Amino acid sequence: MIGIIIGGVVGVLVGSGVLFLLNKTKLKNQSDAIIDEAKAEAEVIKKDKILQAKEKFLQLKEEHEKTISKRERKMSDAENRIKSKETSLNKKLQEVNKKDKDLRSKQGNLDRKLEAVEMQQAELEKNLRKQVEMLEKAAGSSAEEAKAQLVEVLKEEAKTEAMALAKDTIEEAKINANREAKKVVIQSIQRVATEQAIENSVSVFNIDSDDMKGRIIGREGRNIRALEGATGVEIIVDDTPEAIILSCFDPVRRETARLALHQLVSDGRIHPARIEEVVRKTQKQLEDEIIDTGKKTCIDLGIHGLHPELIRMVGRMKYRSSYGQNLLQHSREVANLCATMAAELGLNVKMAKRAGLLHDIGKVPDDEPELPHAILGMKLAEKFKEKAEVCNAIGAHHDEIEMNTLISPIVQVCDAVSGARPGARREIVESYINRIKELESLGMSHAGVEKAYAIQAGRELRVIVQSEKISDIEADKISLDIAQKIQADMTYPGQVKVTVIRERRAVNYAK
């Protein structure tokens, strides 16, 4: 049984092996056929690729040949251009060499001519020295002395011509500048007007009857002494009917005495204790009125942010005067003039008005330091934090310091305009006479001046010079020198016109 099974298995295996061999042979044949087919296709593809490569190679070769041909043409053109330039350069080089040869030839000729000229110059210098020596012997002076004399003569001629030219230039500048300046000043004066208040050093107090004089004097004069001691004012009781005179240089103290006396007379109780009480109250009321006046002035002018102490000083100006002109009215007028001029010139109107109002605060300090009022006013303005432009305008309006803003000359001009109004100021007779004498003496101090007269209340100085000693140009110089000296050495209101007169008169008599 086992043998049959084994035999059957072996038979199956043998049959399977035969089948396997048969299939293997078949697959091998198929694979060989596929390989042969693939080789044939590869050969075809290879031939196609070789053909394509040959075509590409031929195409690239053709393009390369074209490029080479193009480059060769460019190189040929470049070579031609280079050859042309080389030919041109050779021609230019030949021309340069020719010109160089000509220049060398000319240089040689010039050198020879220069040597001849130097020889001629040496000969001329030698002859000139001989002529100079002959001239020096003939003139009796050396060449240096003659040169010095000639220089002096030329200096005098140049100085005379310069004076004439300067005069013409100054006149032309004055014509143009004065026209514009007068226009601005006249417009400002026409637009600003103020009352002219003349202050005195005395006040008159009117009373109803002369019987009141005895009560004011008091027993043995005790009332009047108490009033004078409390106010510092001299009270003059004389034969003037129904009037008592209050005399004091300080308007504030004089006003205090007037108000106190008015209250005492109205009340009827006049004795030393009552007098001292009323004076104290009056001083307090007057101080409040001063502050109110300062505030009202600032409001009227549109000036804001002023320090309280400066406001008080502005109020005190009401009781101060300068040459008889009320200081507050003067300062208000200067402020308005400054604002008008600043507007005409396109400057800061508020700054100009502020500087114009404060320009004289140095005249109303609480103490009296030994300083010019312009410098003192500038220091006060700096102390109370005013701007630098305002401080400079205050300090420079009388030329104590240098002006460094455009507002400063405006304040100076407006101050002069306000003080120069007809009737605005008055002077003590003695100081006026001294000023007139000083003005005439200054005119007589120049050589060649024959007479000098101050006319028109000292606003014009006429100087008569000797015509045989002074020329027209020298007369112009004398006028300018006198004007500058007056401006530098003298104090005067407004301006002084200096007129120099030079005339020649021929007088004969027919007998």
Image (cartoon, rainbow, N blue to C red):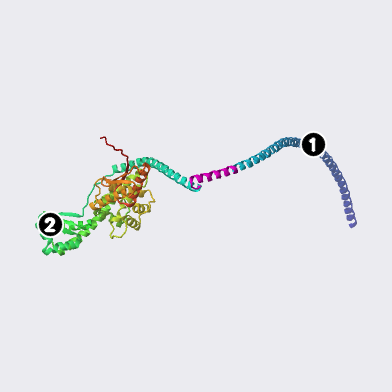
> In percent of the image, x 18 and y 54: which residue is there?
203
Which of the 4 image quadrants contains residue 466? top left
Task: Locate residue 336, reporting x and y percent.
Answer: 30, 47
Q: Which residue is mark 1?
A: 58
Left or right: where does residue 84 sit relative to residue 28? left
Q: Which residue is mark 2?
A: 238
| First along the sequence among labels 1 and 2 | 1
Task: Locate residue 170, reporting x and y percent.
Answer: 38, 42
Q: Is residue 139 magenta?
A: yes
Say which amino acid is labelled 1.
Leu
Q: Is residue 67 magenta?
A: no
Of 499 and 185, the residue lying toward us: 499
Mark 2 crowd level (few <14, some 14–19, many ≥20, 10 Å Cα) = few
Task: Locate residue 406, reporting x and y percent.
Answer: 38, 48
Q: Secondary structure at mark 2?
A: loop
Of 96 and 144, the residue lying toward us: 144
Range covered by the magenta-colored residues: 122-142
The overriding secondary structure of the stretch rendered in magenta is helix
* Distance between the alpha carbons at the discs numbered 1 and 2: 148 Å
Q: Is residue 220 visible?
A: yes
Q: Is residue 322 visible?
A: no
Of 129 and 71, the residue lying toward us: 129
